[in-house]
Amino acid sequence: WSEPKNLGPHVNGPFNEYDPAATPDGTYLLFSSNRPVEGEDAADEKAWPATLREELYQNDYDIYALDLQDAAAAPRRLDVVCSRANDGQPTVSPDGTWLYFASDRAGGRGGYDLWRSRVTLGPLAGLMPPENLGLPVNTAAHELDPAVTLEGFGIYFSSNRAEEQTYAIYYARSHEVFQVVRTRRLAIGHILGELSWPLIGLILALVGLALTLLALA
């Protein structure tokens, strides 16, 4: 590894910056920060979980994105996904279609929940309003640190839902999409074998009619 370099005042400021994560295509850097938001009053909220042990009271955390292809661009707050509560730990699914994050906003199951926003127009563009992942992923306890698997059907996260109240790593698999299992080219005999006999008869009749018409032409 090379010597780490501070990203400087272009990204870092007098407030806290956490949870860096690059988009899969490498065009954006995501992070969370409790920097003041123009037009909002500072909230007497506990700091992001990474600093809970410090017992600090600071502004709520929001998610920001930095365009790595534009040296002059300033980090922009992702207003669609941010709330007056704490929002952070962003990560984008490998195919770039979902932005996952953790938040203690209203409307969840309690504590910090995992949320996601659909990306409809390329890297972090056209973000849709966030949706809660719901049960059984989210509970009245805390769910944090989402990490989506490479194929996009599973998610790892940490939670203190157990009686011991210590954090453990959990895994959940999505049932909303169908995974492609068969990827090899199939033989024609195998394809015909999966068709019903009436359908095969119709196909053969149509082929015979086509050959007859060609012969008469």
Image: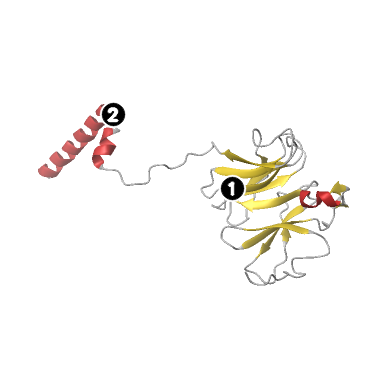
Reading the chain from its start, which is encountered first: label 1 or label 2? 1
**Furthest residue toward front:** 164
Q: Badge 1 is on which residue? A: 148
- Name the foreground residue: 106 vs 173: 173
The local secondary structure at tag 2 comes to loop
Identify which residue, 207 or 173, lies in the foreground. Answer: 173
Expressed as whole percent of the image width and height from the top left, the position of residue 216 reads: 10, 42
Q: Residue furthest top?
A: 198
Give percent across and percent down for residue 74.
72, 66
201 left or right, relative to 29: left
Instruction: Name above or below for residue 112 compared with residue 78.
Output: above
Between 141 and 213, the one nearer to me in the picture = 141
Label 2 sits on residue: 196
The residue drawn where x is 85% and y is 47% is 45
Picture residue at 58% right of the left edge, 54% below the top: 121
> What is the x, y in percent for residue 140?
74, 34
Tag 1, which secondary structure?
strand
Q: Amino acid at mark 2?
A: Ser
Circle 1 packing at 10 Å, graded few (<14), some (14-19), many (20+), is many
Q: Which mark is residue 179?
A: none
Q: Residue at x 66, y 61 (%)?
A: 29
- Which image quarter holds the C terminus? top left
Q: Quadrant of residue 175?
A: top right
